Image: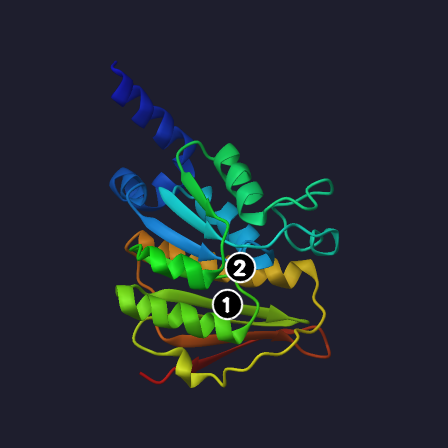
């Protein structure tokens, strides 16, 4: 057996349970997909780990910030001792260490600088923490003709939307300080984003331009509401 055959045998063994879902051809095609995750904090940590471990071939991580100890509790790519290190660089190394079949490139810069690179992606994922940045992501996605997945979370609620034809203009864009937050809701919203991303990249059906709003009510019941975005 030659090296290429050995590689594919090991590759499909690694992704055995996903191959059971959609076959070898679809799994192999994920190696050709390229995505950008904007932000490497709470949402970005979970997104990078989930999609990297799913076999997305190339992931670009964009984040200019450093790891801070007060954020580690919800940013699962980091541990105590990482303080002061660049988030995108630490996350990139961790993702690649978990899956040898993904190439992760960290971009230690602000998004305003990153867009000047004029790179093309199959999908962009929002893992930022403010509305103005998401408006910039929407503009960039429209310029390169790529869909993107919006995600936000605070307190015990979150929002997710696969944006294709709609625009972030539907939101009232303003800068505000987010409320307190716990780790599980961050991972929950990132999981929904990652599932939508993986289905789309694998060629499965995805409901687009539909806003999911998830929250826990006063009795601890998880409520999911859906709103059609204007297109």
Residue 189 location (% of width, % of height): 55, 63
* Residue position marked by numbered label 1 in the rendering: 151
Q: Is residue 120 above or below residue 157?
A: above
Q: Is residue 196 visible?
A: no
Q: Of callouts 1 and 2, which one flags the residue occurring earlier in the amino acid sequence? A: 1
* Residue position marked by numbered label 2 in the rendering: 190
Which mark is on residue 25? Answer: none
Measuring 40% from the left and 38% from the top, which residue is drawn there? Answer: 103
Is mark 1 in CB contact (under 8 Å) with mark 2?
A: yes
Residue 132 location (% of width, % of height): 50, 75
The answer to which of 143 and 188 lies nearer the viewer is 143
Residue 203 location (% of width, % of height): 28, 55
Q: Residues within 10 Å of mark 2 (few under 14, many from 20)?
A: many
From the image, which quarter does the N terminus lie in?
top left
Q: Is residue 189 above or below residue 179?
A: above
Under circle 2, the secondary element is: helix
Q: Is residue 111 visible?
A: yes
Q: Is residue 227 above or below residue 27?
A: below
From the image, which quarter does the C terminus lie in?
bottom left
Quadrant in the picture for residue 196 = bottom left
Marks 1/2: CA–CA distance = 7 Å
Q: Is residue 166 above or below residue 35?
A: below
Measuring 73% from the left and 43% from the top, which residue is drawn there? Answer: 80
Q: Residues within 10 Å of mark 1 (few under 14, many from 20)?
A: many
Measuring 66% from the left and 75% from the top, which residue is drawn there? Answer: 177
Under circle 1, the secondary element is: strand
Q: Is residue 222 left or right of residue 103?
A: right
Residue 86 location (% of width, % of height): 59, 46
The answer to which of 225 and 171 lies nearer the viewer is 171
Quadrant in the picture for residue 13 = top left
């Amino acid at each position: 057996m030659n090296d290429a055959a050995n590689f594919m045998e090991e590759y499909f063994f690694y992704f055995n349970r996903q191959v059971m879902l959609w076959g070898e051809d679809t799994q192999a095609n994920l190696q050709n997909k390229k995505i950008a995750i904007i932000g490497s904090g709470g949402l970005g940590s979970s997104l990078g780990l989930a999609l990297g471990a799913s076999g997305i071939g190339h992931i670009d991580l964009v984040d200019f910030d450093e790891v801070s100890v007060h954020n580690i509790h919800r940013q699962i790519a980091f541990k105590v001792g990482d303080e002061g290190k660049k988030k995108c660089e630490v996350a990139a190394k961790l993702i690649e260490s978990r899956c040898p079949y993904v190439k992760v490139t960290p971009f230690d810069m602000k998004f305003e600088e990153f867009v000047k690179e004029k790179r093309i992606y199959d999908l962009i994922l929002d893992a930022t923490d403010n509305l103005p940045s998401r408006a910039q992501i929407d503009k960039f996605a429209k310029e390169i003709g790529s869909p993107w997945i919006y995600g936000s979370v605070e307190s015990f609620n979150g929002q997710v939307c696969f944006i294709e034809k709609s625009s972030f203009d539907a939101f009232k864009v303003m800068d505000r300080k987010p409320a307190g937050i716990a780790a599980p809701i961050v991972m929950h919203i990132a999981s929904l984003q990652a599932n939508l991303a993986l289905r789309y990249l694998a060629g499965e059906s995805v409901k687009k331009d539909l806003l999911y709003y998830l929250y826990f009510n006063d009795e601890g019941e998880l409520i999911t509401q859906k709103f059609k975005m204007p297109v």
